[in-house]
Amino acid sequence: MDLRNQISIDVPLEFRITRPVACPYLDGRMEQRLAADIDGFANQHDTLAKAGFRRVENWVYKPICAGCNACLPLRIPSGNGRAGGLTISRNQRRVLNRNRDLTRRILPNHSRADHYDLFARYLDSRHSDGQMAEMDEDSYTAMVSSSPIETVLVEYRLDDNPVAVMMLDLQHDGLSAVYSFFEPDLTDRSLGTFMVLDCAAIALEMDLPFLYLGYYIENSRKMSYKNRFQPAEVLRNGIWTAL
């Protein structure tokens, strides 16, 4: 009797450790990551995300840097979670009011030419010396469309032109902000802050308790801004605690 089609083998998720590279956030530090390809393991994503892993394309990763624990996963409440509602400061309310003329659309995670043009302008202005500076349109398309889980693009338009885009993963306990970019010339609008506030509102509309914002690094100018959103929780020693 041929039993080959009746036998199933559970293949474990395989983790790898990356080679050390210069840390993009803290001078003089080296970065290493624990990473796994979850293509075919999509059902494990949410558990890994709750444990501090982040997604990029089909991979999840978390820092495991020797002698450094500066990267802390951070999440904020949507307004309907156990941590209480998101507090909107006076300055953040002004940001919301300044952007009331924007039109929001939630789109499938497909590459669009006008989004890529905006992305390229953003990188050239804000991150020309960063790891993503050399990304071409094919690399951008892979970043946006390669996802083993449900992912959407939240687009904001002004006068029928996209001025900001946030890529969000949908998790069982919240939304996860994977990447965002915006029109660099519109500095007075504080579009980065606006997108975080609006995506927290989207999570609330979906009855999801949290918006995950990636890693918080207290001594990094690129990452420390996240403590402006309160109350916030960070993952320390496997436990989500108030920042």
Image (cartoon, helix red, strand yellow):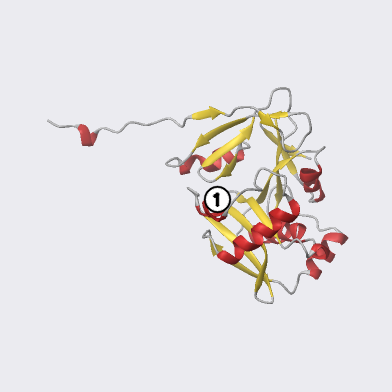
In the displayed structure, does residue 55 sit left or right of residue 94? Answer: left
Dot 1 lies on which element?
Answer: helix
Q: Residue 103 at what x, y percent from top left?
A: 67, 72
Farthest-out residue, top: 67
- The answer to which of 74 and 69 lies nearer the viewer is 69
Quarter of the image with the N terminus is: top left
Farthest-out residue, left: 1
Picture quadrant of residue 156? bottom right
Picture quadrant of residue 92? bottom right
Is residue 200 in view from this perspective? no
- The answer to which of 26 and 178 lies nearer the viewer is 26
In the displayed structure, does residue 128 sit left or right of residue 87? Answer: left
Is residue 163 in view from this perspective? yes
Rendered residue at 57%/43% (across/down): 55
Rendered residue at 72%/38% (across/down): 24
In the displayed structure, does residue 15 sit left or right of residue 220? Answer: left
Q: Residue 198 at what x, y percent from top left?
A: 70, 62
Above or below, 39 against 33 in this view is below
Quarter of the image with the C terminus is: top right
**Residue located beneath label 1 in the image:** 139
Rendered residue at 81%/62% (across/down): 187
